Amino acid sequence: VSNSKLAEEWSFPEGVTYLNHGSFGPPPRCVREARREFQRRLDAQPMDFFLRQFPREWIATRKRLAAFVGADADDLIMVDNATVGMNIVAASVELRPGDEVLCNNHEYGAVLRIWERACRRSGAKLVVPELPFPFRSPEELADKLLQGINRRTRLLVFSHVTSPTAVVFPAERLCRAARQAGVAVCIDGPHAVAMRPLDLKSLDCDFYTASCHKWLSAPFGSGFLYVHPRWQAAIQPAIVSWGRVAEGEESSWRNEFQWLGTRDPSAWLSVTAAINFLEQGGLEDFRRGTHELARYAREQVTRLTGLEPPVPDDDAWYGSMATLPLPPGEAEPLQRDLWQKHGIEAPIIDWSRQRWIRVSCHLYNREADVDRLVAALRNLL
Ligand SMILES: Cc1ncc(COP(=O)(O)O)c(C=O)c1O
């Protein structure tokens, strides 16, 4: 099946140009149907579903997802989203007064808040260095970030693909260096799932937390947390319930995460359908095609504004979305006008004393969407 054929699995309301798959990626029709089918089975016979079907499906989903991200299924649990995963990590890494957690200024606001609270409660310190931007080389980025490590640093937290700036961080290099320094690494990865090839085993990070409802286009409310075996004994659940052992599973750290009280697990279980869907058209082709369109957006917006993009034109630096600088002005009214006057959904971001636009490109986006965006920006700026 070609990727242009797969694009027909999405339909938006008339007049909507959706260029924000990176924030909220709507699932394609077949994934919605897969979810509805799980809900139908759950509602039809809850006893059978919760007691007999769900444990089996939970294990199968974890196996499929683990293979997709290059992890062992024993090291991965389903969570609602990256935020939940990050909160579990923050509740599990024991910090002492004087310890430091190293982030940086490209991190997601909610993630900074999670670590601010964890540090405040334990007397530790959150360190958020400003990295030199635009980025010129991965060496420079890594060197600057790693300068923040000292003997008090307990954990390095960084995004695999950053939210405000859409930059791919050199994850392998950072993990290697942190390991050499004896510092644990937690990667915030929601934008990387499907957008980048993942091999968590060889990455050898300590934690990797992600949402599957972005680039993978699984239902909203699906994500995962990967925990390296060296940390599994320390993991604390955010929600305590029965700690039930799934039939067919050994007792393990995962027990606490299968049953979180009675809830609808259909989003988690439909992750398999989302992986199957994207793999039909070929992941390489998906990545190449969406990157080419992000590159086109970058060229067109740059031509309009005359402002240089913040990273070199290379798919090592950005994948299916690009963040580009805009002339000075307020972010919020521009985003509102894009939507109200032109039907265009794209985030306008105030970040580091500059106004930016982030353009996300998925299978259903075309050059015509970007052209409409650029025409609207020409009009509004
Ligand atoms: C880098 C990054 N981390 C974390 C999150 C939080 O994801 P979620 O809202 O799915 O928990 C986002 C969401 O946009 C993100 O971009």
Image (spheres, rainbow, N blue to C red):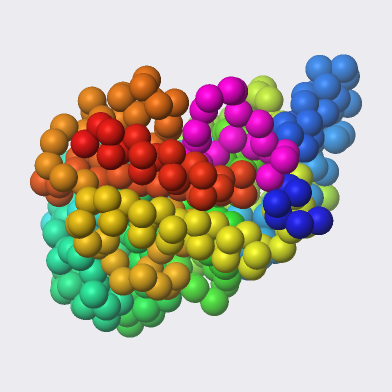
Kindly indicate the quadrant of the structure image that contains residue 29: top right
Residue 226 lies in magenta, yes or no? no
Q: Is residue 169 left or right of residue 131?
A: right
Q: Is residue 78 left or right of residue 93?
A: right
Q: Residue at x 77, y 26 (%)?
A: 36
Give the quarter of the figure containing the C terminus: top left
Kindly indicate the quadrant of the structure image that contains residue 140: bottom left
Instruction: Decide which of 33, 151 is in the foreground and name it.
Output: 33
Q: Main secondary structure of the magenta part?
A: loop
Kindly indicate the quadrant of the structure image that contains residue 371: top left
Tell me if residue 122 can be seen.
no
**Residue 146: horizontal and vertical position, in percent?**
22, 73
> Is 16 above or below relative to 255?
above
Q: Residue at x 30, y 30 (%)?
A: 335
> Is 271 above or below relative to 70?
above
Give the quarter of the figure containing the N terminus: bottom right
In the rendered image, the residue lying farthest to the top is 44
Q: Is residue 162 left or right of residue 280?
A: left
Instruction: Decide which of 166, 131 is in the foreground and name it.
Output: 166
Instruction: Decide which of 280, 83 is in the foreground and name it.
Output: 280
- Which range of residues does the magenta coloring cover? 7-28
Tell me if residue 219 can be seen.
yes
Residue 10 lies in magenta, yes or no? yes
Q: Residue at x 36, y 39 (%)?
A: 375
**Residue 42: horizontal and vertical position, in percent?**
81, 23
Q: Residue at x 47, y 52 (%)?
A: 191
**Residue 250: horizontal and vertical position, in percent?**
74, 54
Q: Is residue 114 left or right of residue 329?
A: right
Instruction: Decide which of 108, 116 is in the foreground and name it.
Output: 108
**Residue 344: horizontal and vertical position, in percent?**
43, 31
